[in-house]
Amino acid sequence: MDVAGGGELSQWLTGRPDGYQASWNVKPTQRIPIALTSAKDGAKRFELAHWSLVPPWSQDLRLKFPTFNARSEQLAEKATFRGPLKQQRCVVPVSGFYEWTGPKGSRTPHAVFGPEPLLPLAGLYSWWREPGASEGRGWHLTATILTRASAGVMGDLHDRMPVFMSDELLLEWLDPETEGDQLLVDAVSEAALPISERLREYAVGPLRGDGPELIEPLTVPPLGFEPRLRRF
């Protein structure tokens, strides 16, 4: 993972998480790298997490309802996310993501890129432990990505988009001593708007398998635009 252009987040990205493999087609419940600050000792950590947040009270790692995304506007109202919002906030660094347009059955995927090589997304994390696990075992780090109403380049692709993390609020978002509330979420969401104006995107072919060929454009991209997507 290239950390060039990581800004403030580069303090966390000092090496690849154990088991990390580049992917061009990550799906929910697979593992994604997240940056967080430990609430216990303040250590900056960069680790792989199960992509779908699982609350501590769940009896199973796989939930009946989707939690890979969390609507930022309602975050403080939802029991699943209200607890992690207080101290367990994270950032998911990606080099790009996909969004689809068109009618069901003939949808076209688009590769979306940020203004820098890394595009940090605001998220939450939670530790979930397998019921009946022995002492010190059975722990799973899980995470979700925040979304908001689309703006900027994303406005023509979908009605929702990830909450892009601004450098100005990143340190506060990752500080567990700052108690998170809806006001903080709203500020982070609002700060995503200028970033949404600087995104670039183009249509790609069907997303089958996993490899760099997935980001080859269907048409020639604008002059000087270099694809650099590695999903996570």
Image: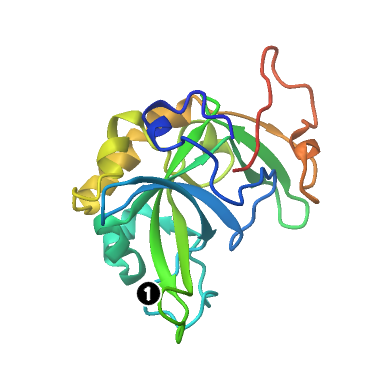
Looking at the rendering, which quadrant does residue 126 occupy?
A: bottom left
178 to the left or right of 75? left
Q: Nearer the viewer, residue 133 or 148?
A: 133
- Identify the image's colour scheme: rainbow, by chain, secondary structure or one colour: rainbow
* Residue 174, horizontal then vertical, whole percent: 31, 44
Q: Residues within 10 Å of mark 1 (few under 14, many from 20)?
A: some
Q: Which residue: 77% across, 30% down?
A: 217
Q: Is residue 154 above or below residue 50?
A: above
92 to the left or right of 26? left
The residue tagged 1 is 56
Q: Which residue: 36% across, 29% down?
A: 8
209 to the left or right of 93? right
Q: Which residue: 45% across, 58% down?
A: 143
The image shows a total of numbered marks equal to: 1
Q: Quadrant of the N terminus?
A: top right
* Residue 208, horizontal then vertical, whole percent: 80, 51
Q: Quadrant of the C terminus?
A: top right
- Tell which residue pokes out farthest to the bottom in this image: 132
* Residue 173, horizontal then vertical, whole percent: 29, 43
Q: Which residue: 58% across, 56% down?
A: 31
* Residue 92, horizontal then vertical, whole percent: 47, 45
Q: Nearer the viewer, residue 87 or 78?
A: 87
Looking at the rendering, which quadrant does residue 97 occupy?
A: top right
178 to the left or right of 206? left
Q: Nearer the viewer, residue 50 or 81?
A: 50
- Tell which residue pokes out farthest to the top in this image: 223
SS class, disc 1: loop
Q: Nearer the viewer, residue 155 or 76?
A: 76
Q: Is residue 226 above or below residue 167?
A: above
Amino acid under label 1? Pro
